Amino acid sequence: MKLCRFDRDRLGLVDGDRVRDVTAALDALPSYRYPLPEHDVLLANLDIVRARVEQVAPAAAGVPLDSVVLRSPVANPGKIIAAPVNYQTHLDEARANADIHHNNPLHTLTIQTAGLFLKATSSLAGPGDGIAIRWPDRRTDPEVELVIVVGRQGTRIGRDRAMDHVAGYTIGLDVTTRGTEDRSFRKSSDSYSIVGPWLVTADELPDPGALDLSLSINGEQKQASNTRHLIVDVAGLVEMASSFYTLYPGDVIFTGTPEGVSPIQAGDRVVASVAGIGTLKVAVR
Ligand code: MN
C-alpha cells in the first residue's frame, strides 16, 4: 500500500497516477491528550488505519497526483536519524574534495566509527513544501537517500528481528550545507529533511537492499546507484540505531547517499527516484 499526506493533512491512497482521499480512515485513530506520545500516531496504529483505508477506498474520490501538494507521509517523527558516509563511493568523493569535507574532522571517519547522527524534527518537509535555501552563499547539496520508517517500538533490536520493526520506506533528501560545523547543525535548517512522496508499506518492498536510486537537478542526472552498495544495510541500521536508543513508530532513518552529491540554488528543480517507491519532485527557493 502507498499512503501519502497531501494538501491540508488529507490522507491519500496512491493508485497509479491518482490519489484517493481516504482521510475518513483517520477516524480509526485513538484520541490523545497532553502529553502526546513519543511516537507518530499514524505509524503506531498503521494496521487499523490500513484496514479502514481498504474499506473506504472504493468509494473515495480520486484526483490526479499532479494536482495535489504532497507533504511528508510521516507527520510527527520522534527522531530523524541519519547515516553518514554509508556508500564507499561517497566516502571516497568526500575525502577527495575539500568543497565537500571542509577539513571537518568527521570526514576521516567511517560509519562504523562515526555512528549515526540526528537531524532536528523541525527540518521535516514534504516534496510539495520545497527546499528553502538558508545560506545562499554556501554550497548546499540535496542528498538522495532511501528512508526507513519505523513501525514498531524496540530497543537493542538484533539484526535477525530488525525487519519486524520496519513499517515501510520512502525517499529522503538530506539537504546539507557544506562547512565546518557539526553535521546535525548544518543539516537541520527548516525544510532540509525532505521526505516523500509517500510511504510504501514493507510488504511491497521485500528486498530494500536491491533498489536503484537516482537524483537529477534541472533534468541533469547527478547521482545514480543501488542500495546494494550500502555499507550498513537496512537491518544493520535498525540494529545500530537501536543499540543506542529506543526506536518508536514514526522514527525515520535516512540510510545515506551515494556519490555524485551536487549543489543547488534557488530556482532549481530536484527530482529523486527510488525503484519500487516512486519519484519525488521538489522546487528550490
Ligand atoms: Mn546524507
Image: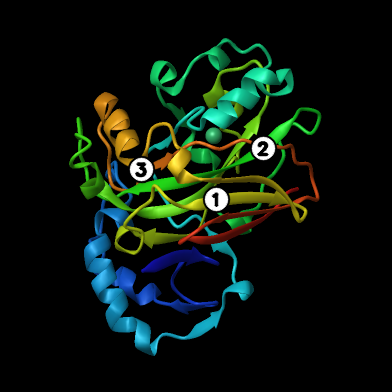
Mark identifier at residue 260: 2
- Front residue (pair 28, 217): 217
Q: Which residue is mark 3?
A: 251
How far across and how far down the image is residue 285, in percent? 75, 48
Give the SS element for disc 3: loop
Q: Amino acid at mark 2?
A: Gly
Colour scheme of the picture: rainbow
| Mark 3 burial class by Cα count in 10 Å: few <14, some 14-19, many 20+ | many
Q: CA distance from mark 2 to mark 1?
A: 12 Å
Q: Amino acid at mark 1?
A: Leu
Mark 3 vs 1, N-terminal side: 1
The answer to whether residue 100 is above or below residue 214 is: above
Q: Is residue 279 left or right of residue 113?
A: right
Q: Amino acid at mark 3?
A: Asp
- Front residue (pair 219, 69): 219
How far across and how far down the image is residue 2, in percent? 41, 67
Residue with the most extreme bottom position: 59
